[in-house]
Image (spheres, rainbow, N blue to C red):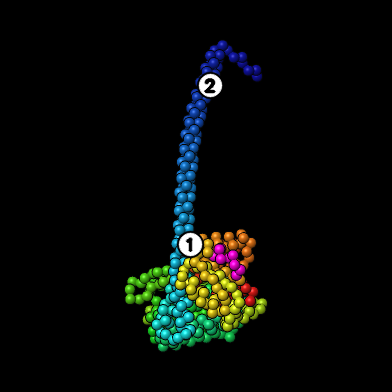
Amino acid sequence: MARPASTSSDAPSDVARLERRARRERAARKEAERLLEEKSRALWEANQALKAAHDDLEERVTQRTSELAEALREAQQASEAKSTFLAHMSHELRTPLMSILGYTADRMEQESCSDLDVVHRNATHLLGLINEVLDLAKVESGTLQIQPAPTALRELFEQVLATVAVSANAKGLVLAPCIGPDVPEHAAIDALRVRQVLLNVIGNAVKFTEQGGVVVDVRATGPQRLIVSVIDSGPGIAADLGPHLFEPFVRTQDRSRPGTGLGLAITAQLVRLMGGTITFDSTPGQGSRFDIELPVPPVPRAPEAVEAPVEGLPLKGRRILLADDARDSLVLLERWVRRAGADTTAVEDGQQAVDAMASPYDLVLMDMQMPVLDGLDATRRIRASGDRTPILALTANTMAEDQLACLGAGCDGFLSKPVDRARLLRAILDHLGS
């Protein structure tokens, strides 16, 4: 059936629909434009806020970086100041201690005197405290190095026990050592540090025990590890001290009971550096037990035998130049070297040492801190002249950087004060090729 043709009356309604549609579209477009404008404004505001936050963060990071750099600089300055102070104090304390220990040892060789023994023993104790302070500083700075070497292990334990036995016997204590058959004869260890650890722990056990005794049990816990158990019948460790036992200079609430010094703090650090552990168990009034476990790597061969003591006149016919501004030390050194048969010349500053080298010498003992010209500059000038005479640095500065400075200036060897006669003569003979 055919669709009827539209009439003229339908035209106005079509126009009205189109106008309404156009109005709706205009309204929708305006709404879209409004929403777009709002979103754009919100996005712009968000971008501005983000930029502000970014700028603020950058400023805070820059400020914090600057603060951290300043804190690092101050920490480095403090560390350098501490190192300088320790080096200076080491020199100032070790130099007189060398005279005290050297002169008393000489007199004790000639005569038995209890007063001299007291002086020598206390001077040795002071030297031990100085070494502990320096060791703690090295540990804190990360410069202390463990130096394993082939060592007669069982012999080391026997030497330590013999040393501590003197104090135990004087107090009437029983020192009961037990070195198990499974403890190896030799191992690659740092003998100096192991001895230091053992003397600290066993020495403390004897020091704080008044009745009964101390048991030292050494046994292997594996193919390359051993444990040293030190058990005493002393007063035990105060409960409030236990958590802080390996911290330096901690006091107990009961002032009548001992606190901590430096010994155990350094002991714990040394044990850790050697790859070991140290633990303790204590009951107040019933004694204490310390367990030290250490690695003992095997060595392919036995260590070389310890050299025999220097006797007689091994330096007869040799000419030795001694340079040291500490008069007492200079006289002592000259006495020791002359007793070994050498001819000596003694000077008290570096410039005098340089001038004295116009004559030939077999060896120079050179202190590093002297007036007019220090030992480092004196050594450099001697080397600059082409003179290759062996120069042995003798100094109270014992830090690793001090030794490197001496060797870098041209010294052939390094001895730290205080030095005893046997060690001095052995070092001289080594550098003379004797």
Highlighted range, magenta: 353-361
Task: Where is residue 262? Give x, y as percent.
Answer: 43, 70
Image coordinates for residue 149, horizontal then vertical, percent: 60, 74
Give the mark count.
2
* Residue at image point 39% right, 84% down: 210
Q: Which residue is mark 2?
A: 21
Q: Residue at x 55, y 73 (%)?
A: 344
Which comes sooner in the sequence, label 1 or label 2? 2
Asked whether the beta carbons under mark 1 and mark 2 sit within 8 Å of each other, the answer is: no
Is residue 203 found inside the magenta-colored segment of the image?
no
At x 63%, y 79%, the residue is: 304
For the N terminus, which image quadrant? top right
| Badge 2: residue crowd in 10 Å (few <14, some 14–19, many ≥20) | few
Element at badge 1?
Answer: loop
Which residue is the site of mark 1? 371
Identified by mark 1, the residue type is Pro
Say which of 127 and 357 sits in front.
357
Q: Seen from this angle, which residue lies furthest top?
A: 8
> Looking at this view, is 431 or 34 the one in front?
431
In which quadrant of the rendered view does residue 81 lie? bottom left
| Element carrying mark 2 | helix
Residue 272: x %, y % from top left: 52, 70
Image position of 135 with respect to 24: above or below:
below
